[in-house]
Image: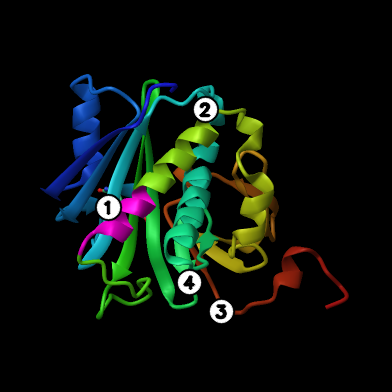
């Protein structure tokens, strides 16, 4: 990916993810970043929809990573780290990451990443809620109005450049230690669909979430898990460790 980033701006689109894929299919030069001012049919993980906030960043990056595809399980986590650092640089706010790739603050989820692959390409979408006076439950925004679209644009550009620089380098430098520090899922009891329950104890080097369950330690992979939620029900993390000293 030594070629310069090609940037497309668009006013209105159904999904930046679909449009970026379409441009890549048509032979668009990669890496390609598509940024939309408004998005009407955003897509989320696991076939869900994505509601785009009244003031939001919606963008998708198509890349041909230098990494071999067995290392691509780390890409969603790299995208979360790059988004976190771009938000910090542009608006000065610290956001945390909920495994695998939700951007969260104390108020709720403020953004998400959607990673998809096709052959030797990856399309990684980023949505960030900048301003949303009346968001749905558990959803929040950064509380920043951006009528000139400058903030959204700056976050997108910094995010894409950081992603490209990591994906052009050695995969072992993907940000493992940093991810473990900013991942708020660690140390919490979680449930996941269809019927999993345990305590998230660590991140594996390939990006999997390590979870202690009553049946032993499991590795959850982002593509295999539909939803991970924290639980406060019957919370007693010690029972997953056979911890007598609790
Ligand atoms: C998730 O949390 O489920 C991931 C949401 C990803 C949403 C972004 S918005 C820009 C890009 N275009 C889409 O259609 N989806 C992603």
Whether label 1 lies within 8 Å of ligand 1 gets the answer: yes
- The first of marks 1 and 3 along the sequence is 1
What separation in Å lies between label 1 and label 2 (alpha carbons)? 23 Å
Q: Viewer-nearest of labels 2 and 3?
A: 2
Q: Is residue 79 visible?
A: yes
In which image quadrant can residue 51 be found?
Answer: bottom left
Relative image position of residue 160 (x, y in whole percent): 40, 41
Which residue does the numbered mark 4 point to in the structure image?
A: 105
Task: Check disc 2 and report the residue beneath it.
Answer: 168
* 236 left or right, relative to 141: right
What residue is pinned by disc 3? 233
- In this rendering, the label closer to the viewer, 2 or 4: 2
The x and y percentages for residue 242 are 81, 65
Q: Is residue 211 visible?
A: no
Determine which of the numbered discs, if any, sits on residue 58 in the image.
Answer: 1
Residue 151 vertical placement versus 156 (above, below): below
- In the figure, 215 relative to 164: above or below? below
Mark with earlier residue (4, 1): 1
Q: CA distance from mark 1 to mark 3?
A: 35 Å
| Residue 203, placed above or below residue 88 | above
Ligand 1 within 8 Å of disc 4? The answer is no
């Amino acid at each position: 990916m030594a070629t310069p980033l090609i940037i497309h701006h668009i006013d209105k689109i159904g999904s930046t993810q679909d449009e970026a894929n379409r441009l890549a299919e048509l032979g668009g030069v990669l890496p390609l970043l598509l940024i939309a001012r408004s998005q009407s049919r955003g897509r989320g993980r696991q076939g869900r929809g994505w509601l785009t906030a009244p003031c939001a960043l919606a963008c998708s990056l198509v890349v041909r990573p230098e990494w071999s595809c067995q290392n691509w399980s780390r890409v969603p986590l790299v995208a979360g780290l790059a988004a976190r650092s771009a938000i910090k640089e542009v608006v000065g706010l610290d956001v945390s990451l909920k495994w695998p790739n939700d951007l969260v603050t104390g108020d709720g989820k403020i953004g998400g990443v959607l990673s998809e692959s096709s052959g030797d390409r990856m399309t990684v979408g980023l949505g960030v809620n900048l301003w949303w006076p009346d968001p749905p439950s558990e959803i929040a925004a950064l509380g920043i109005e951006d009528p000139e679209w400058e903030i959204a644009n700056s976050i997108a550009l910094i995010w894409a450049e950081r992603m490209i620089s990591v994906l052009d380098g050695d995969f072992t430098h993907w940000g493992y230690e940093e991810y473990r520090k900013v991942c708020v899922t660690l140390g919490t009891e979680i449930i996941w669909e269809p019927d999993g329950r345990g305590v998230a104890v660590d991140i594996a080097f390939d990006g999997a979430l390590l979870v202690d369950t009553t049946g032993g330690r499991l590795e959850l992979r982002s593509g295999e898990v539909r939803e991970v939620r924290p639980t406060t029900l019957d919370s007693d993390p010690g029972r997953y460790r056979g911890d007598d000293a609790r």
